[in-house]
Image (cartoon, grey):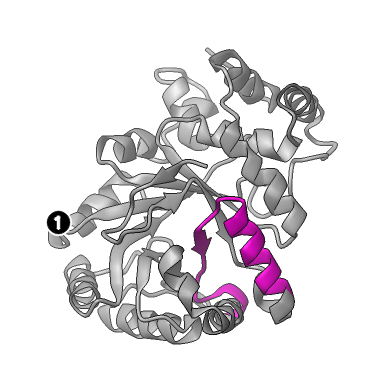
Amino acid sequence: MDYVEISSGSVKASGIVLGCMRIGGLNQKRVQELVEAAVHAGINTFDHADIYGGGKCEEAFGEFLMQRPGMREEIFLQSKCGICEGYYDFSGEHILKSADGILRRLHTDYLDLLILHRPDVLMEAEEMADAMYALKREGKVREFGVSNMNPVQIELIKKYYKGKIAVNQLQFSAAHTCIIDEGINVNIPSEAGCMHTGSILDYCRWNDIVIQSWSSLQYGFFEGTFLGNEKYPKLNAVLGRLAEKYGVTSGAIAIAWILRCPGIGQAVIGTTGCERVWQLAKAADVKLTRKEWYEVYLSAGNRLP
């Protein structure tokens, strides 16, 4: 497993992140088994958001931490705030209140990373920065990140917050490739060449902002997984052949494809199955060749100019 340095703490974050969006309905035995399986596979980073399960996912994880208090210093714990029912809220008051709620539900004194969850058009960057500085000063949050933001939105925050913007969470998978399509199709009059993200991949690389992929095995906007999906026969055929070559699953190849892309430092997986965690963690041991990486890209229906 590869690890990246994100926060000022002593724990580096694993290249594969376990997303905890679906653990709210699991009993404590299942949560414990899942977290321990992840840790044993080399995954030490756990991704939450205050909206996941209406807070129940954080509560379930927090109960686990209460039973295993010694584990807190061994893991990298992150959560997100800003999405409310029917609107976004990056007001300073909401950020402070959300952070306190997250810490209470997770039964921890600090977050390694707090991510601002999707852009709020009404954000007042100076007010946001005041809240961010307050959380850092009080030791409640070590570093901050953003989610689904373009370069100018991040620059607006950085105008007032001079600390580190450590992470940008972006949707990226073999079947959702717009953050790389625009770079491949520069000066090409086609939909693939449209600037959908403002060159966010290159911007993050330039500014040492780690990109975390979300929906790493999905296509569309929560439309489902492309693995074994009849909509993607060529992609699945290539993933299957490479899986056989490297002795892993097709899912592991799909995650290895993400991590092979420079700038994509972490891939979030959302499984609640222990065996599945082990299978996907093996992606860290696979490094696709350039030819193989492009073959996967083309097999998903993309083209090269």
Q: Label 1 sits on what residue type?
A: Lys
Q: Residue at 67% across / 68% down in the picture?
A: 22
Identified at 31% across, 59% down, the residue is 10
Q: Is residue 268 above or below residue 262?
A: below
Total numbered circles: 1
Q: Over which residues does the magenta segment extend?
A: 30-54
- Mark 1: which secondary structure? helix
Q: Position of residue 144 (x, y in %)?
A: 31, 62
Label 1: which residue? 159
Q: Does the stretch in magenta take in 6?
A: no
On the image, the x and y values in percent for residue 179 come to: 47, 36
Compared to 162, does 27 lie above or below? below
Residue 37 within the magenta-colored segment of the rendering? yes
Q: Residue extending furthest right?
A: 230
**Identity of the residue drawn at 44% across and 68% down:** 80
- Decide if residue 275 is in sight here: yes
